[in-house]
Amino acid sequence: MQIVPEPDNPFEMLIRLFLVIFVSLAAFFGASGDMSFTGSGGGQPPPPPPPETGGTGGEPVARPTLAPGLVESPTVIESVEALIMESNPPQISLNVRGYQPDGCTFPVVVQQAREGSTVRVSIYREMPNDIMCTMMLQPYSDTIVLDGTFEPGSYTIDVNGFVITVTI
């Protein structure tokens, strides 16, 4: 049996310590069967959002189904400003600001659903569920013109959970 001498260089000791920690972590994650570092839940896609309802009977609004292996990555919304356009009947546009929670550059999808005086806007990206992205926030800014016209009254606008009220 050969005994390895104690290193005289403190940097060499530090490197050996990091090596021991790395090997220990690799053994721990290897034993648990979860070597993915893709985010929460060990790389599992987030649960699907509850279906939006439309009309008066509460039936689900038709949403396109995602291709196998894709998940929705919602945009984080920080501010929504409603602008009432001077038209007859009035229309509403939204100045939306927020960010994408990662550095991936997939196209943004914007969907709208209107139910009485409530408008729901979903902003997300369709991404492969096994993609690894950089941990860099990407700013998001867009002007979205809401579908249809708006009669005088009060409207609730929900953009990815950011809710505002507009009175015309």
Image (cartoon, grey):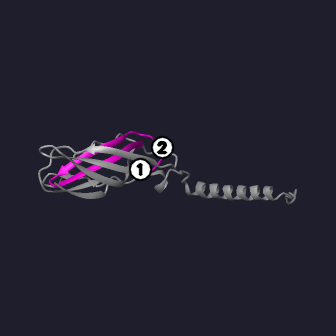
User: In this image, 59 relative to 142: left or right?
Assistant: left
Say which element carries label 1.
Answer: strand
Residue 126 in magenta stretch: yes
Q: Outermost residue toward the front?
A: 86
From which residue to which does the magenta span run?
A: 101-127
Picture layout, residue 66 above or below residue 2: above
The residue at the point 30 percent across, 44 percent down is: 143
Residue type at numbered disc 1: Tyr
Q: Mark number for residue 131? A: 2
Residue 56 quadrant: bottom left
Where residue 167 sits: x, y (%)? 18, 57
Residue type at numbered disc 2: Ile
In three-dimensional space, the C-alpha distance between marks 1 and 2, rounded to whole angstroms, equals 18 Å
Residue 60 appearing in the image: no
Picture layout, residue 117 above or below residue 134: below
For mark 1, what is the residue? Answer: 99
